[in-house]
Amino acid sequence: MEMKSDLTSKENIKPAWLDEDHPNFERWKRGRELSVLRGRFVLSIVREYMTCRKLKVLDLGSGEGGTSKVFSEDNFVVSFDISTIRLKRQAENFGLINIVCGSSSRLPFKEKSFDLIIIQDVIEHINQESIKAEKLYDLLKENGVIYLSTPNKYSLFNMISDPHWGFPIIAVMNRESIRKYFLKYFRKNEVNRQDIAQLLSLSEIKKRFEEKFLIELNTKKSVSELFNGNKGIVWSNFHLGLIKILISLKLHRLIIRFANNNFGFVNKFLTSTFYIVMRKK
C-alpha cells in the first residue's frame, strides 16, 4: 500500500493554535510538545488489544504527528489530516512521509485497508456526519480495532473548566451556541472557525457506535497512569493544578480505587476524557 503526500489544499491565514497572542497559546503549545508522549500512551492502550507490529494504521486527524511517529517505528502508518500546516510540520519534525491531506467526510481508502484506526481528540471537532460508524467499519480488517479518545461532555471537571477554552459550562454547549454566546463576545476573531469542539457524552458515543462495534473503556489505566506522572494525558493548567491538589491531599489513592471501566456514574459524570477501544462485532 503506497500513499503519496497531498498538500494541495490552502490555508491562507495563520491558525489560532500558532498565534502567540492567543489566550490558549501556552496550553496548545504544551500539547504539541507532548505529542510523542501522548502517542506512547495510545500505544500502551492498544497493545493490550493487539500486537503492534506490522500493522497498517490510519491516524485520522493526526495533528502534530507524535502518535503517527510512535506507531511508525514498527508499523505502516498513514497520517491523515485536513491541515496542510500540520502535515508539513509532521514531515519537518518527524520525517513522516505517508501523509495525506483531506477531509474525514471523504476518506480515499479501500475497504478493509487497516488493522488499526486512531481517532485521538478529533471527533469532537467535526460534524457528526463526517465520521460514520459504517465507514470506519468498512475500512477495518476483520480483527481490526479503533482507538478513540475524546473529552467527556458531562464531566464535572470539564463543566468547571472546558478543556479547549478554560471556561465553565462551555463543555455542555453545542457548536452553534459556543459560536453565538462565547466566541462572539470573548474570541471574536474565531467566530467563523469550523473546528469548534462540541463535546460528546458517553451515551452519545454508545448511540453512535454500538450497533457496529464492541465498546470498551480504559479509565482504570488512564487514571493510574495520570497519577503515576504520565505527562502525555493532561496539559491544561486547571487539570494539572487539580492533580497536584488531589495528590497533596492524598485523595488520588481513593480516585484510583474507584476508577472503573463500567458505563456507570463515574464514567458518565466524573471521567474527564474517554479512552476507548472499539472492536468490530
Image: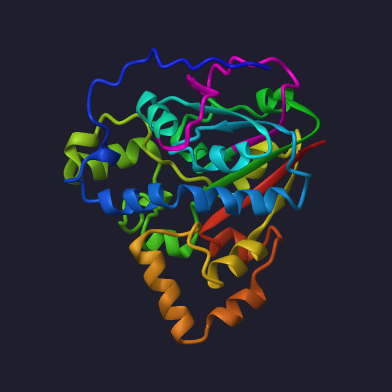
| Residue at x 62%, y 40% (from the top left corner) | 71
Query: Quarter of the image containing the C terminus?
Result: top right
On screen, residue 132 above or below 9: below
Tell me if residue 278 can be seen. yes
55 with respect to 186 (left or right): right
On screen, residue 53 above or below 2: below
- Confirm whether the magenta stretch covers residue 237: no
Query: Mostly what secondary structure, the magenta segment?
Result: loop
Residue 80 placement (x, y as % from top left)? 52, 26
On screen, residue 109 above or below 195: above
Chosen colour scheme: rainbow
| Residue at x 60%, y 81% (from the top left corner) | 254
Residue 85 placement (x, y as % from top left)? 35, 28
Tell me if residue 152 can be seen. no
Q: Which quadrant of the structure image shows residue 129?
A: top right
Residue 99 placement (x, y as % from top left)? 51, 24
Q: Which quadrant of the structure image shows residue 67?
A: top right
Segment colored magenta: 93-118
- Confirm whether the magenta stretch covers residue 99: yes
Compare residues 114 and 151 and report the one nearer the observer.
Answer: 114
| Residue at x 66%, y 44% (from the top left corner) | 206
Residue 211 placement (x, y as % from top left)? 75, 35
Compare residues 113 and 187 and report the one nearer the observer.
Answer: 113
| Residue at x 60%, y 62% (from the top left corner) | 222
Compare residues 53 and 25 and report the one nearer the observer.
Answer: 53
Number of labelled discs? 0
Query: Quarter of the image containing the N terminus?
Result: top right
